[in-house]
Image: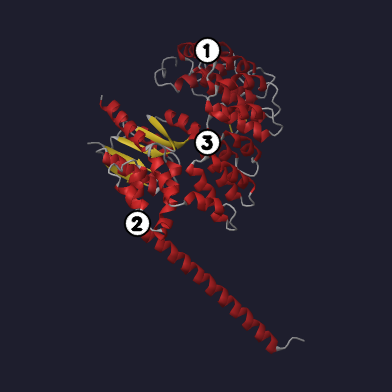
Amino acid sequence: MISAAWLTGTALLIGSLCVTLAAVTALWRAVQDARRRRRARLLAPVRPLVLRLAAGGDEDGDAVRTLTALDRRTWASVEPLVVKMLGKIRGEARGELVGLLQHHGAGARARVNLSSRSMTARATAAETLGVLGEVSAAEPVRALLTDPSPDVRQVAARALGYTGDPSVADDLLDALGSVPAQTIAQTLLNLGSTTAPTLISALTDERDAVRSVAVEVLGLFQFVGAVKPLGLMLPVEPSLQVQLRIATALGRLGHPGALGPLTAALAPRHPAALRASAAAALGQLGASRAVTPLAGLLADPAHAVASAAAAALTRLGSAGVSALADMVAADPPPGGARILIHEGGRHRAVPPGQAGAHAAAALDTMPQERGKVRA
Amino acid sequence: MSIVLIADDDPDILDLIQFKLEQAGHTLVTATDGTSALAEARRVTPDVAVLDVAMPGLSGLDVCRELRADAATAGIPVILLTARAQESDVEVGFEVGADDYLTKPFSPRELVSRVAAVIGRTRA
């Protein structure tokens, strides 16, 4: 049987533990707040100097001189702002900021901190080495792509983008799944088109995510050398999501070589989503030879396809506008130009006049054409 | 002297741009979110608005769209600041009526040139 004294003793013990824990937490917070306030106090008078330097406005060299002469304690408060600015700006001011970091030994400190037990210290070290832009920093930072902390992995990936070393592209693609695809894509873009050969090779990777990012980045680079491989890949790509990205990328690339693969993707045997993406991409491509196949889609039973074709035709100059106007004349939409075709998330079957409705709705989005072809 | 509205949720970037544009002789009006950017644009009708695309609440794209929809602010030139991977934002930006864009990381000196060019085009 449990005695009253034992219960009282246990309750007192638990109570005192809670009080101790609360006191330790409050103390820890107070120390952190005091540290933050001290850093803010030290930073405040020199912050305008850092911003002036980052803005390229230190003509008399006064800001550099003052920041170079800062003591270690003050510099510790300033360094995070300098690192942050290096991630936000480019141009000649970068050199001055990098020089400051080097002068205060930030690079050497960061290399040591890459293996710190503190997650924050590892992430900060990776970011610092990244913004310093040294190719030699790529090797130690790339090891952090497999760090146990997702935050550190993400910062490391971003940091690799600043090193300018294209050899990290493979490691970045391998990190997909443990680092968000958007971060990987951004980093590859920052590394520049020297990564294009790696990305072209990645088009045959067995992982959908790798092919997807490679396609996306090649399109954003507008790397003309990607037109042919992407065109060959489009009809045989097993993933619909990747196919959609290929169509978009081919549109972005804006090369006549994309016309054939995109036109072939309009065929009725393909999924409606792909046909719609191909139609939109043909509009972006701006090739007048796309007018005839796109006009043929205005009566397509899939609303998304017909609508995308109509919108694409508005981007193909006078030939596209003529095709839309001809369709309105040949197939007048019942009850005026604006007809609700997409209702409650479901597509209705195509009634007579619907091709004209799509065409009229597209023309209605063009201020210069509005009202010309309406009855 | 031109009035330039800058909207960015990062106070360091805001101060950096403010320093650079004031040095170039412009008068600055600042906002740290899309809603106050819109309010400031309606209040002062700046000669140009520099809007960060990714802001809390109303994005730079939303602000641009709202400016164009109002006859009183439709003529304000807009420069968007965007990250490079957000090129779709750039496309949408031009669709909603932006006049120019700069990708981050950006060159402060280039921003000054773009602002001057946009103001020059508007006054021509």
Q: CA distance from mark 2 to mark 3?
A: 33 Å
The residue wearing badge 2 is A44
Horizontally, residue A136 falls left or right of residue A317, namely right
Mark 1 residue type: Met
Q: Secondary structure at mark 3?
A: loop
Who comes first in sequence, dot 1 or dot 3? Answer: 3
Density class for disc 2 (Cα within 10 Å; few <14, some 14-19, many ≥20) is few
Q: How many marks?
A: 3
Q: Which mark is residue A164?
A: 3
Q: Position of residue A90 (x, y in %)?
A: 42, 38
Q: Which residue is mark 1?
A: A327
Amino acid type shown at disc 3: Gly
Q: Is residue A223 above or below residue A184?
A: above
Discs 2 and 3 lie in a common subunit: yes
Q: Say which residue appears at 33% left-offset and 49% top-offset.
A: A65
Residue at (59%, 22%) from the top-left corner? A226
Please report, as a chain letter, where disc 3 is located.
A
Which residue is most to the left? B1
- Residues at marks 1 and 2 on the same chain: yes
Comparing A99 with B66, the one in front is: A99
Give the vertical position of A235 relative to A89 (above or below): above
Q: Position of residue A165 (x, y in %)?
A: 55, 36
Location of residue A76 (image quadrant): bottom left
Task: Estimate the spatial distance between the alpha carbons at disc 1 and disc 2, rounded to whole Å.
Answer: 66 Å
Do tag 1 and tag 2 residues touch (Cβ < 8 Å)? no
Q: Is residue A19 visible?
A: yes
Most foreground residue, B8 or A83: A83
> Of residues A352 and B13, which is closer to you in this image?
B13
